[in-house]
Amino acid sequence: MPKKIKNDPEADEVMTKIRKRLNKTLAGFSPDFPAGLDSWDMESSRPPAELFPVPELVLFTFRNILGWRWSGAGEKVRWTVYGSVLGEPVGFELRKFGFTILRAKDHKVPYDRIVGQVGAAMRQIEELLAPFAAEQARLGNVLIVNRFGEFESRYRYFRGKARKAFAKADKPAQLPKLPKARKEKESEAGLPVGMIAAVLNQLHAAQTEGYFLTTAMIEAFFSAMEHRLILLRAFSGQPLESGGLEVFLEKSWDEKLKAVFPLDNNHQAGVTLGKLRRIKERLRNPFSHGGVENDGGSLFFHLPGIGVVPANFSDFADSPRFSFIPIKVDNFEECCSVFDAVHDMLSTGPLVFPHRFVDAGVDPSFDAKTLSEYAGAMAKGAEAVAQWIELWGHNWTTHANMDY
């Protein structure tokens, strides 16, 4: 919410209208709270988290707009606001284990009434703040949660599973055991048809498992990479123009990559990016977009007197559908090699310090002041970066655990 400008009649009029609307929604609510009453002596209850998913808006409503008394932070408590409903003391509190409503032990006001009225007020506040939130996003005054560890773990999980599946496909199949008499009888005739089918089924099952897991690995890698590029854009420390963050987020993944890692005079990086694009076009897109291939490989036309022919003709040999198993171990190894090269591009050389912020789990802010902090720490070297990350981690842990 923009700061109130002193002696601004227009701002005063807006706030008066907001308070009038809230007071109507919160009929019966008052900032009065008994002097000397300890909130720890009140009955506490936690409403379902989905009813108040952003409890900070409760603090903003009652403290910043309606002027209720508040306190914080405390042991395992971030903040508390104090008031009353129909003369009964009430409080709203954000504790370590969730948003909490405080009431007198001998309360008579229905709990559902309190929850319903406060919930209605929150919807009004969200409507009020929506334009401001959009403006803050446009200016880049926002934070993005760093989920790189989650994305990377998902990619590594599927990669490890796919490798095991393809390794299983390479092992000699375990033949079914036959009774000794039958084994001697059939030794001269070779393997029975049933045995051969069992061997082929084992091989096909392992290859199919590897194929399914590789498609999941590829999708997970591209998601992790795009998320990483957004984080690296912040930790590069380069300032953003007004609206620059929104423009960056709308870019395709390869445009983001080139913005974070300029390819000028870097032949090897250009080669790696070309291989990555090929994986995207040949393997990722067809399995992520309903089987549609950009070069027409998913389209077949009828050639009179002959039958159906792929619309991309001989290029169909490069389609994953050219083989009975669309993705085999050689495709898997190719992907792993390219993905490892991309990881090296984005975590070494000019990006070694930005990636330390990423890997440490720092949640990046995109405002000019914080971007300047990232740049300043990196300019001083590895030790300064490590110290910055350590301080951030300490503050984050303190806030998350509410160990004030």
Image: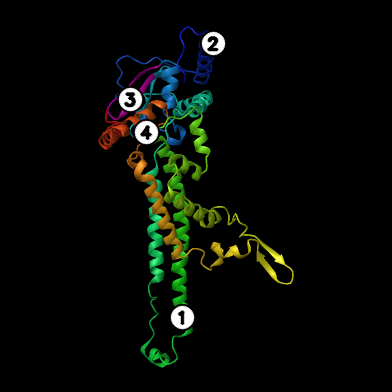
Relative to 321, is 191 above or below? below
Circles 4, 1 touching at the beta carbon (< 8 Å): no
Q: In the rendered structure, which amino acid carries the disc numbered 3?
A: Met
Magenta stretch, main secondary structure class: strand
Q: Which residue is mark 4?
A: 98
Q: Which mark is residue 42?
A: 3
* Image spot of residue 317 (x, y percent): 56, 65
- Determine the CA span between mark 2 and mark 4: 37 Å
* Image spot of residue 314 (x, y percent): 61, 65
- Determine the CA span between mark 4 and mark 1: 60 Å
- Determine the CA span between mark 2 and mark 3: 41 Å
Circles 1, 2 touching at the beta carbon (< 8 Å): no
Q: Which residue is mark 2?
A: 10
Relative to 241, is 320 above or below? below
Q: Is residue 302 left or right of residue 1?
A: right
Q: Which residue is mark 1?
A: 196
Q: Which structural element holds mark 3?
A: loop
Q: Is residue 48 visible?
A: no
